[in-house]
Amino acid sequence: MRILVYGDSNSWGYLDDGSGTRHPERWPVMMARHLRAAGTEIELVEECLPGRTTNVDDPQEGAWCNGSAPLQAILLSQQPLDHIILMLGTNDMKARFNRDAPAIAAGLMSLLAIIRDTAAGPGGWHDEATAPVTIICPPELGELADDPHWIRHREWRGGRATSQTLPPVLREACVAAGAGFIDGNRHAVSSPRDPIHWSAETQAAFGVAIAREIKASG
């Protein structure tokens, strides 16, 4: 089973310690490890980029943050794919984008449309299969995001409220589109010292939980 994870810094393995180093036991790695231990042969493909949005250019960081721009090329270069896991939306919550939950859900649905329009599923280059998709709703931002004394408060102002309203909106969109849905809030909590990122313990636990969800979904 060849699984592609398409995500941002939390899937890349950026921890709450601010070190900027990539955690070796990040959740995609732990997911794959747990699936292998449960008897599923896994080939993990990680396409995760800190700062990545769903489908909007970042005027501060650059157009390279736009998750829609490289997606089709990535799908084609990484095929054949048996499953695609998509977890984006956190960076869309930055104040400079002025996006609410429906706009973020729409951004994710635009990525789903690209995936479904790209024949990168099981088989060879000329096959027309597409890979099934599971969309993970990112966990809500931590309380520190609302603290005006936090160094990045202005950048993330209002983001926590948006993150709290996203799960039901995204769930409804996924059901309507026939995509798999996992609410990340069931398995992870943002760190109290970094409201955007997670602890090493959360990374590991999240990976095990997602493996169980994927296994259960068949």
Image: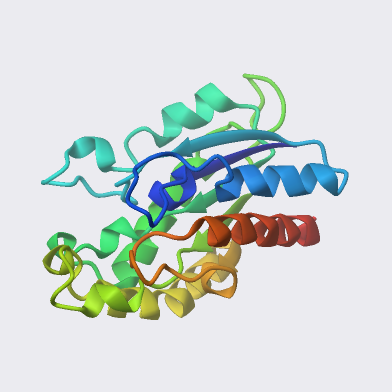
What residue do we see at 51% from left, 31% from top?
75
**Horizontally, is 154 left or right of 161 in the view?**
left
* Scheme by which the image is coloured: rainbow
**Residue 96 place in picture, x, y as percent:** 13, 60
What residue do we see at 29% from left, 66% from top?
103
The one of 151 and 162 positioned closer to us in this rendering: 151
**Residue 171 place in picture, x, y as percent:** 52, 72
What residue do we see at 48% from left, 50% from top?
112
| Residue 15 drawn above or below residue 189 | above
The one of 43 and 127 positioned closer to us in this rendering: 43
**Residue 62 place in picture, x, y as percent:** 17, 38
Q: Find residue 155 and report its image quarter.
A: bottom left
The one of 9 and 149 positioned closer to us in this rendering: 149
What residue do we see at 60% from left, 27% from top?
79
Counting the numbered discs, the total is 0
Where, quadrant-wise, is the N terminus in this rendering? Answer: top right
**Horizontally, is 133 left or right of 140 in the view?**
right
Q: Residue furthest right?
A: 39
| Residue 142 drawn above or below residue 44 | below
Decide if residue 61 is in sight here: yes
**Residue 142 place in picture, x, y as percent:** 36, 74
**Horizontally, is 158 left or right of 71 in the view?**
left
Decide if residue 84 is in sight here: no
The one of 216 and 157 positioned closer to us in this rendering: 157
